[in-house]
Amino acid sequence: QPQLVESGGGLVQPGDSLRLSCGVSGGSFSSYAMAWFRQTPGKEREFVAATVWSGMVKDYADSVKGRFTISRDNAKNMLDLQMTNLKPDDTGIYFCAAERYGAAASTSRRATDYDYWGQGTQVTVSS
């Protein structure tokens, strides 16, 4: 069972940038599809971005496309999310997730397809 640990959250102002990281220990990171989701109180977990095991295919929610970039370093077992031009609607707890048997050329936006989850890191965008 791999362990996923997010870091990098914080309180920022609208228009600021923030970089989230997810370190994965145990398991087989380089074979996992990876994703970021976010959640706010009273709402379901929302897909943000995902990438296949190789990093060659990426998918983004429309709300973050052009502002967020997902990347991975398989040598370091790290997943990142670079967030720019942050908006108040980006506020939430951000979770990284791993899918054991993801496809090579496509990713999933369904939280139920992901097998392992981190505990989350809080991002608050407020003036």
Image (cartoon, grey):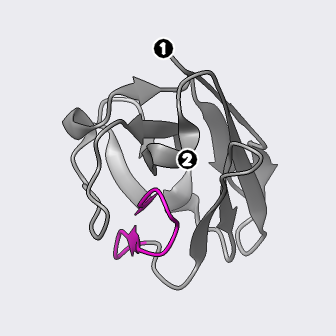
Q: Which secondary structure, mark 2?
A: helix
For the stretch drawn in magenta, what is the main secondary structure?
Answer: loop
Pointer 1: what residue?
1
Q: Earlier in the sequence, mark 1 or mark 2?
A: 1
Pointer 2: what residue?
30
* Magenta span contains residue 53: yes
Q: Quadrant of residue 114?
A: top left
Q: Residue at x 72, y 46 (%)?
A: 21
Q: Position of residue 106 (x, y in %)?
A: 27, 67
Q: Residue at x 53, y 85 (%)?
A: 66
Write the start and end of the magenta stretch as one range.
Answer: 50-63
Q: Residue furthest bottom?
A: 66
The residue carrying pointer 2 sits among few (fewer than 14), some (14 to 19) or many (20 or more) residues within 10 Å by Cα, namely: some
Marks 1 and 2, Cα distance to the nearest angstrom?
14 Å
Side (left or right) of 97 relative to 23: left
The reply to whether residue 65 is in sight is: yes
Q: Which secondary structure, mark 1?
A: loop
- Location of the C terminus by quadrant is bottom right
Q: Amino acid at mark 1?
A: Gln
